[in-house]
Amino acid sequence: MRCASSRFIWRMICRKAFQVAEPKLNRAMAKVNGINLFYRDTLSGDQTILCLHGRWGRGETWTDLIARYRDRYRIIAPDQRGHGLSDKPIARYAGEDMATDAYELIQHLGCAPVIVVGHSMGARIGAYLTARYPQVVKAFALLDCGASGPAQRAEKPPEQIPAIDELTRDWQTPYPTYDDALRDLQQRFRATGARYFADSLYETVDGYDFLFSRYSIAAIVEYAQDWHHLLPQIQCPVWFVRAKESWALSKEEADKMRPLIEHCAYFEVSNSEHMVYADNPDEFYPAFDQFLRRIGDG
């Protein structure tokens, strides 16, 4: 019997090898807000779900959600600026900027109003999108993200931000082989977190590295700001989800946010530290289905 580490690596290799067996997705670039944004699109269904991933991620993190809902919905999952195959400009990465990326993608595809599903950083971007462009959002699933941050946004010019990601700065990248990368990720994270980072691995002439830009990660942190003020502006139905063992969203922070959201349904996912849709799909997706039924889309 293989050890847990070997089983994880084998699952990841098999997943990559057999991705061609998955239902075909349309993959394309859209010119939005001055950048090229890569996105996946099922081109199915009348109602659209727009999925916004977190820091270090890609639209590929939503593979399971896409498989579950593509027969009923059109699913659009972009790589957000600075991540995946999208542009990684030396620019601002404030919530407003990335929300405008999403808004212009919705306009480009003519799919409004959408159901926004945002996780972690993607939830923050979803909040800016929903508050600033309410006409294009029908409902919002806010997944495991707190609204606290600096009271004032930094005014540092983008070109002065060092390309240093504090989380990954000491990782020994590029990795010599794909297996080496997977072993390292498995040692650092539980299986769902390791898979999340593995989705961004790609081969270079020097070995395997990540598609996200270290500069972009640093700029996202630099331009972060408290966004509690956005919550009362959100008038559509909101499904606010917290991982019960979350390291990203404390119970106290969630309790502070909930009264500020007018149409809020709150849910906690057990046996999850942050990746609520991946850590416990058997609990997450039935609750998501209930939310969709509540807004008339189940």
Image (cartoon, rainbow, N blue to C red):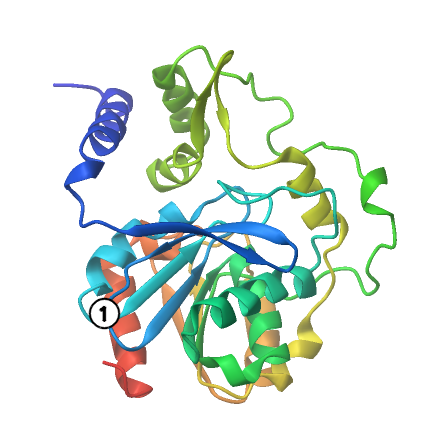
- Kind of residue at badge 1: Pro
Query: Is residue 217 visible in the rendered structure shown here?
Result: yes
For disc 1, the neighbor class at 10 Å (few under 14, some 14 to 19, many from 20) is few
Q: Position of residue 240 (x, y in %)?
A: 46, 73
Query: Is residue 146 visible in the rendered structure shown here?
Result: no
Residue 153 located left or right of residue 45: right
Could you tell me which secondary element the residue under label 1 belongs to? helix
Q: Quadrant of residue 73?
A: bottom left
Nearest the viewer among 193 and 207 is 207
Query: In the rendered image of this protein, does residue 4 appear above or below residue 258?
Result: above
Q: Residue at x 72, y 56 (%)?
A: 224
Q: Residue at x 52, y 59 (%)?
A: 122
Residue receiving disc 1: 286
Q: Position of residue 28 (x, y in %)?
A: 41, 50
Residue 218 located left or right of residue 276: right
Residue 283 located left or right of residue 120: left
Query: In the rendered image of this protein, does residue 246 appear above or below residue 231?
Result: above
Q: Quadrant of residue 189?
A: top left
List the single residue furthest toward the left: 1
Q: Position of residue 251 (x, y in %)?
A: 53, 66
